[in-house]
Image: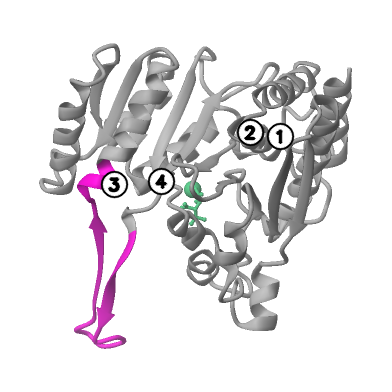
Amino acid sequence: MTTYKLALIPGDGIGVDVTDATMKVIAAAASRFGFALETETFPWSCEYYLETGAMMPADGIETLRRFDAIYLGAVGWPATVPDAVSLHGLLLPIRKAFNQYANIRPHRLLPGVEGPLKSDAFDILCIRENTEGEYSGAGGRVHQGTANEVAVETSVFTRAGVERILRFGFEQAQARRKHLTSVTKSNAQKYSMVFWDEVTRELAAEYPDVTVSHMHIDAMAAKMVMAPQDLDVIVASNLFGDILTDLGAAIQGGLGFAASANISPDRVNPSMFEPVHGSAPDIAGKNIANPIAAIWSGAMMLDHLGQAEAGAAILAAIEAATAKGIGIRPGLNTTDEVTAAVLAALEA
Ligand code: IPM
Ligand code: MN
């Protein structure tokens, strides 16, 4: 029997609640589809930081490298650890160290879920660059605390980095409705974004079956509200993709439905799967977090590991649950109730 080694990092807040829920569903899928899971749970979190002074041990990355995939709940507990410390100590270094350059985020309405828009017929796949761009980490501050203080944070766009994410986007478009929209701000940012547009045009010639549109981030924000049904695959830089995928979460009914995968496409290193919603300290541990985004991210993990049938069955089970009205609005059901409904549908 195939066995997958999974590293679990529940992290902070509702990350713990939804990781538990997801692992119940993943375990049920494993027994139904005939594969095995070997999981190891790491306590790396803001609490761990307060105890040890670091979000993960110095050899954390090396430890994770041995796994087939990483499942992460959420990181952040701003009341005790500043977000810029916790995120730069755990989530962001994992994405970069393992070259998880493609952050995939699907946006569509699950059956029974009412979004805020008139249109319910959209099915968008956002491909966010996940290792460089505005999140390069290049920068610094001088003259701190004085009137002459300067803070610089430089976006870094490399040809290798831009080309690989665009190729990934083109390939995703080929597997879907064959339309790619590249999102930049090349009317204002004349170096990096003009460069991105040029690379897009160069590559487009290699994917003649894909139609390509270029849009600016501001216009895209409006488009996702006014006419999301016209979009198929979107590809964007790290920060632009971050912003658009919260908008995507909003139009799909909320962050409780927004799944994501941090993919390392060459498969040399593990990929990481996490819901988009974050740690939500206000509702942590109350059994009210919606686990759907997390479970959907788990389905993406199984799909990536080669268990496409199991991944599809989990997604179908989520859809069966929401079609019955389970988990379709915040506060409607407990985490346990939603998980039980998904499990029942999976086992039916
Ligand atoms: C996300 C999150 C992270 C990001 C934060 C927590 C650093 O917002 O995954 O979308 O900006 O990448
Ligand atoms: Mn975000």
Residue 227 visible to the viewer: no
Pick whichever, 40 or 230, lies toward us: 40
Q: Mark 1 highlights which residue?
A: 292
Callouts 2 and 1 close, C-beta under 8 Å:
yes
Q: Mark 3 highlights which residue?
A: 161
Q: Which residues are magenta?
A: 136-162
Give the mark, 2 or 4, whose residue is nearer the N terminus.
4
State the SS at label 4.
loop
Quadrant in the picture for residue 97: bottom left
In the rendered structure, does residue 92 fall within the stretch colored magenta?
no
Total marks placed: 4
Density class for disc 2 (Cα within 10 Å; few <14, some 14-19, many ≥20) is many
Q: What's the residue type where badge 2 is placed?
A: Phe
Q: Mark 4 highlights which residue?
A: 101
Q: In this image, 313 relative to 278: left or right? A: right
Q: What's the residue type where badge 1 is placed?
A: Ile
Q: Residue 179, percent across and down?
A: 34, 16
Q: Residue at x 60, y 72 (%)?
A: 55
